[in-house]
Amino acid sequence: MNMNGLLSGTTILDLTRVVSGPCCTRTLADLGAEVLKIEPPEGDLLRGGIPKVDGIFVGFAQLNAGKRFMSINLASEKGQDLVQRLAIDCDVIIENYRPGVVNRLGLDYEKIRALKDDIIYCSISGYGQDGPAKNRRAYAPIIHAELGLLHQNAREWDTEPMPETASHADFAVGMQACNGILAALFHHAKTGEGAYIDASMAETMLAMNEATAVEVNGGVGDQLSPFRPGKAPIIQVKDGTFGQLPGNPAVMVYRVASVLGKNQELEELGWGSPGSMNIDQAKEKLREWAGEFEDLKTLEQALDKIKLPIGVVSSLADTAQTDWALARHAFKDVALGNGTAKLPVSPLRIKNYYVGPRTGAKQQGEENRDVLSRKLGLSKAELNLLEKENVLIVHRHSG
């Protein structure tokens, strides 16, 4: 197996932090690119989370494993000069500051393009690089609220609006940015031209929600539709295990009745055809029938006759020990400082090529000297002076 990866020889300058940018550059690193992660003097905000292994937050490691860890004070002219010089040696630059911040740092697209005219430059932001909302601060929970997700969930679940527990918007825009970068690299290979990519969280969430076109074109109201994932029923069997069925219960209940021999029961209730019962009534009936089974495996075997799967409601921790995850080697023990942590490898498998982190996560600025001496030819004396002047930052985060 080729351990270099399909992007071997590609160098990425990573000016991103927290989630949206780092998940993008982690994917590029998994594919074999060399990613130079530049943290500010205070470090990536995500380093502050828990739990830690040898002072490194495992969540930070999940999004940054496989990169080269540097920390440069971009508020200083010398720091800006160092990063500009590094940019000349890079193929791609990615940043997720608010629009305008990179201009003040001397690292905006036009500035870098003047130094390297074929650069591929990607900016990730909340609402894009233009328009009246461009300067708004945007985090995943804000985007979830303003792009309809919380409203949609509350309506489907018949609850007050509640926050999402995962940063969906961050990961979604990170993958959209990655798509744009890979397309730009392909274009560069054919033409030698660079590209500028503007990826917004807001527009990503429009594209990544299958209800967007439905809602903005009038919605479904009370009409029967099979595409209502928020209405998909949760059931429980006798041993206490919960399971998730897919689809609209008012549509699937008739298929389930046919395979479980419950058609007559529905007819006696006056529910002989789709539309004669509402979603809540259908959910309750499906839960009642599921409760007659000893375990989910037995129920799943019964429903397999109509090709209806069941998902076991599991914790994330439990997934690491499932048969499929073990068989796919979905997790890997990765170095975090002097310790190790189990991290997800990659959702991709490419025949004959390894996809995943080749190294672990390190302390802030730990690889400043190695990268700058190798890339820019800086001497030990020059590096010592830059550290003394607080242009280069080296900080060990404690547990």
Image (cartoon, rainbow, N blue to C red):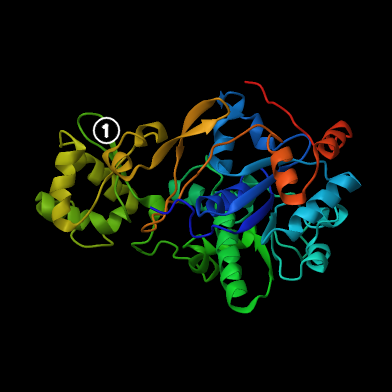
Quarter assignment of residue 162: top right
Q: Label 1 belongs to which residue?
A: 241
- Where is residue 399 shown, x and y percent of the image? 62, 20
Q: At x 78% / y 34%, what residue is drawn?
A: 393
Name the residue furthest top: 399
Q: Is residue 288 left or right of residue 339?
A: left
Q: At x 48% / y 62%, what residue is drawn?
A: 211
The answer to whether residue 134 is above or below residue 361 is below
Q: Is residue 66 left or right of residue 289?
A: right
Q: Is residue 180 left or right of residue 245?
A: right
The answer to whether residue 100 is above or below residue 188 is above
Disc 1 element: loop
- Where is residue 23 shown, x and y percent of the image? 57, 48
- Where is residue 261 shown, x and y percent of the image? 9, 51
- From this viewpoint, is residue 49 visible? yes
Quarter assignment of residue 384: top right
Q: At x 16% / y 52%, what residue is drawn?
A: 304
Q: Nearer the viewer, residue 331 or 378?
A: 378
Tag 1: amino acid: Thr
- Where is residue 377 shown, x and y percent of the image? 77, 48
Q: At x 75% / y 57%, what residue is drawn?
A: 87
Q: Nearer the viewer, residue 166 or 64?
A: 64
Q: How many marks?
A: 1
